[in-house]
Image: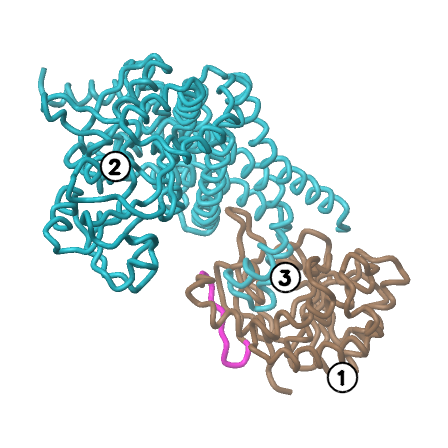
Chain colours: A cyan, B brown
């Protein structure tokens, strides 16, 4: 088999896929298909969250390892750890290196803008640590004027920087922080309570002192396109919290405190992801898809109107060759399916070195296709204006351009607008076709949601309702215009 | 009397069918010429050839230093053609007013867009013209709201607003009721008194009687059968 045949076969294979790849689809689908839940964490200096067992370094232990295993049992999937530097937790998650980021990831508004979070599984505060026998600091205020070590990019660092009077010494990992404190290079350390409890607690030369500073919550981070996984995680976390399993884990790692009681109370409200909630769960995603559908429609229509008008002028006034060319374009475009045109643009052009991104290919495909139909509407509209109008314009000394602009087009628009609006409604619905070239608009969103949940009916009805809600006003407008046209006296 | 329009050996065919065969004619300024003849002899076509609304295959049409020649390309020679059209106003049998524009806009469109007149000036001219034919009250109306007679009066004004040297009128009253015909004839009569050159294709005895200074009878293919002065 030579290379060309192979390329052709691969091409045909791609084209034959009903929905090319379930890329960026709901993570829960993958999780259930493979039976494994991939979670991202950093184990270097990761105690007591997730770290190599000092006795058996090839084994990773920690309270988060215990939690994820409990969650796995709840969801009937096997957790698999994917190692990632801590500061890469979110980017790697977005790259689909794993399904959840689960490693002391504080829930913050900044992160919420990029990813989704599960219900919180741990409520933490910041713990002050000093050298044994040194005066104890009780609050952030008392740390003012001192050198205080902490982890970079942590909540503690933010709190101290905001205070403004504390000399913050940021470190990449906790071991060095407590070492330098012991050696007197810093006056205190401020870190998340589990870290302080693990590293400083057993150290006779250090003491955890004062009241807890600040407060934050850890949650599992997930991509925004996976609401079902999020719901499953919420369900599992609530379940192990209510069963007391979570408390047992925290007590084992010596990080249970009154704060966790409060968290447990808040998790009582989390309901089991019953099937009825599937629609509500996916509604925001469907809305986002609808937004994309609107953008696609508008972009394609602008292109269709512009190119369509050009084609129409070429056909009516362009001289023999331009007119023939325009005519040929219109016939070819109208005589071939839009679907094939989209495939050619998106999967075909790369074969000759032209690579369009899916969005551009979608707008081009839809726009150039509808331009052919639009141009025929315009042509009919311009031809419907009596010949006497053009003669009158010419008799006044107008050029052909002036006659078109001031006399013919303004009159033709009334004839053109209603069918053109109808065309736009058709285009609006046809945007569902671009889901085949991986543009995540409304239909593709529906497809992803439905193949994940098998709720084809409910989600389908909601999707159809969204389409209808958008197209109906347009069709009312079109009908109103047609009425006005008929009412107009001639 | 200075020369106004000179037609030299004008020939026009539709395919193989000859409509005008070698027509020679001179019209002086201030003349009011009525063209008569059975329908189908090419009277209207002849009138339309004078401003190249119909292209012709032979001869010339001259007016002052402007010359239309057979086979001119409308786009290539549009300056010449447009200049001539501005001098020879055209009035159509079925008015051909612009239905999407008000009466006033119908009268100012040409002056503003073609002659480049300031909008205010074109408006003043238009209102003065409308006043003359008693249509000032209709300046904001759309053509559809006017009677046929009123529409044709606006049609005449639209041509006049371009400050032409002569008016070509193609059966201007034949689609009107008798009363309306009178309105239009009155307007033409007033123009005649101002000394405007008129070329009319018409069968109306009233028009001929009131306006004609010269009557030309066409036979088939626009052969001139008779050409006489009228009082």
For the point 39% across and 28% down, which residue is it? A226
Q: Residue under label 1, please give it.
A: B194
Q: Secondary structure at mark 3?
A: helix
B16 in relation to B154, above or below: above
* Disc on the earlier residue, 3 or 2: 2
Q: Chain of mark 3?
A: A
| View extreme (front): residue | A133
State the extent of the magenta-drawn residues as a range.
B63-71
* Residue holding disc 2: A197
Instruction: State which chain disc 2 sits on.
Output: A
Q: Is residue B210 visible?
A: no
Q: Nearer the viewer, residue B105 or A68?
A: A68
Calculate the distance from the C-alpha at mark 1 to the C-alpha at mark 3.
25 Å
Instruction: Using the rendered view, name the quadrant where residue A325 is placed.
Output: top left
> Please, is residue B88 above or below residue B100 in the view?
below
Which of labels 3 and 2 is toward the front?
Answer: 2
Q: Position of residue A395 (x, y in %)?
A: 60, 65
């Amino acid at each position: 088999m030579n290379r060309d045949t192979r390329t052709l076969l691969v091409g045909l294979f791609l084209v034959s896929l009903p929905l090319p790849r379930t890329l960026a689809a709901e993570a829960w689908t993958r999780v259930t298909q493979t039976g494994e839940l991939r979670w991202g964490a950093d184990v270097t200096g990761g105690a007591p969250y997730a770290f190599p067992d000092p006795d058996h370094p090839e084994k990773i232990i920690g309270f988060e390892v215990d939690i994820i295993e409990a969650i796995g049992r709840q969801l009937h999937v096997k957790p698999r750890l994917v190692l990632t530097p801590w500061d890469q937790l979110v980017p790697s998650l977005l790259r689909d290196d794993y399904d959840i980021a689960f490693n002391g990831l504080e829930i913050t508004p900044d992160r919420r803008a990029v990813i989704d979070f599960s219900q919180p599984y741990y409520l933490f505060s910041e713990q002050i640590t000093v050298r044994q026998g040194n005066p104890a600091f009780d609050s952030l205020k008392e740390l003012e004027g001192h050198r205080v070590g902490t982890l970079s990019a942590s909540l503690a660092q933010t709190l101290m920087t905001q205070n403004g009077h504390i000399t913050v010494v940021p470190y990449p990992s906790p071991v060095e922080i407590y070492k330098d404190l012991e050696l007197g290079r810093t006056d205190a350390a401020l870190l998340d309570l589990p870290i302080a409890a693990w590293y400083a607690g057993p150290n006779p030369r250090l003491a955890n002192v004062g009241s807890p500073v600040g407060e934050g919550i850890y949650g599992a981070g997930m991509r925004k396109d996976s609401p079902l996984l999020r719901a499953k995680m919420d369900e599992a976390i609530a379940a192990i919290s209510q069963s007391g399993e979570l408390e047992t884990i925290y007590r084992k790692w010596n990080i249970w405190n009154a704060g966790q009681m409060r968290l447990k109370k808040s998790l009582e409200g989390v309901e089991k992801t019953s099937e009825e909630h599937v629609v509500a769960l996916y509604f925001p995603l469907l809305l986002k898809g609808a937004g994309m559908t609107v953008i696609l429609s508008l972009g394609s229509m602008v292109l269709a109107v512009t190119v369509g008008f050009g084609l129409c002028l070429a056909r009516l006034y362009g001289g023999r060759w331009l007119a023939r060319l325009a005519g040929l374009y219109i016939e070819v475009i109208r005589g071939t399916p839009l679907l094939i045109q989209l495939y050619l643009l998106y999967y075909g052009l790369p074969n000759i070195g032209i690579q369009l991104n899916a969005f551009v290919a979608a707008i081009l495909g839809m726009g150039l296709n509808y331009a052919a139909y639009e141009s025929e509407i315009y042509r009919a509209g311009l031809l419907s204006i009596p010949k006497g109008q053009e003669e009158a314009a010419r008799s006044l000394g107008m050029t052909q351009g002036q006659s078109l602009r001031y006399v013919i087009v303004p009159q033709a628009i009334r004839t053109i607008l209603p069918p053109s609006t109808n065309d736009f409604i058709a285009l609006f619905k046809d945007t569902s076709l671009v889901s085949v070239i991986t543009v995540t608009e409304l239909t593709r969103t529906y497809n992803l949601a439905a193949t994940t949940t098998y709720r084809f009916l409910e989600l389908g009805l909601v999707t159809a309702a969204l389409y209808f809600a958008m197209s109906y006003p347009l069709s009312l407008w079109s009908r109103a215009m047609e009425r006005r046209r008929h009412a107009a006296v001639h | 009397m200075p020369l106004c329009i000179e037609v030299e050996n004008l020939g026009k065919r539709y395919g193989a069918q000859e409509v005008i065969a070698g027509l020679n004619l001179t019209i002086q300024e201030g003349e009011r010429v009525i063209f008569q003849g059975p329908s189908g002899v090419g009277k209207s076509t002849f009138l339309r050839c004078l401003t190249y609304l119909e292209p012709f295959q032979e001869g010339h049409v001259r007016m002052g230093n402007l010359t239309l020649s057979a086979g001119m390309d409308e786009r290539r020679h549009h300056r010449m053609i447009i200049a001539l059209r501005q001098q020879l106003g055209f009035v159509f049998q079925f008015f051909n007013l612009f239905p999407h524009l008000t009466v006033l806009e119908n009268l100012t469109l040409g002056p503003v867009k073609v002659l480049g007149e300031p909008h205010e000036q074109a408006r003043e001219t238009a209102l003065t013209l409308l006043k003359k034919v008693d249509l000032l009250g209709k300046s904001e109306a759309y053509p559809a709201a006017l009677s046929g007679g009123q529409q044709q009066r606006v049609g005449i004004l639209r041509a006049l607003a371009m400050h032409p040297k002569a008016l070509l009128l193609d059966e201007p009253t034949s689609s009107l009721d008798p009363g309306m015909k009178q309105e239009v004839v009155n307007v033409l009569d007033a123009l005649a008194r101002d000394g405007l050159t008129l070329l009319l294709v018409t069968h109306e005895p009233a028009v001929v009687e009131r306006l004609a200074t010269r009557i030309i009878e066409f036979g088939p293919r626009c052969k001139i059968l008779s050409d006489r002065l009228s009082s």
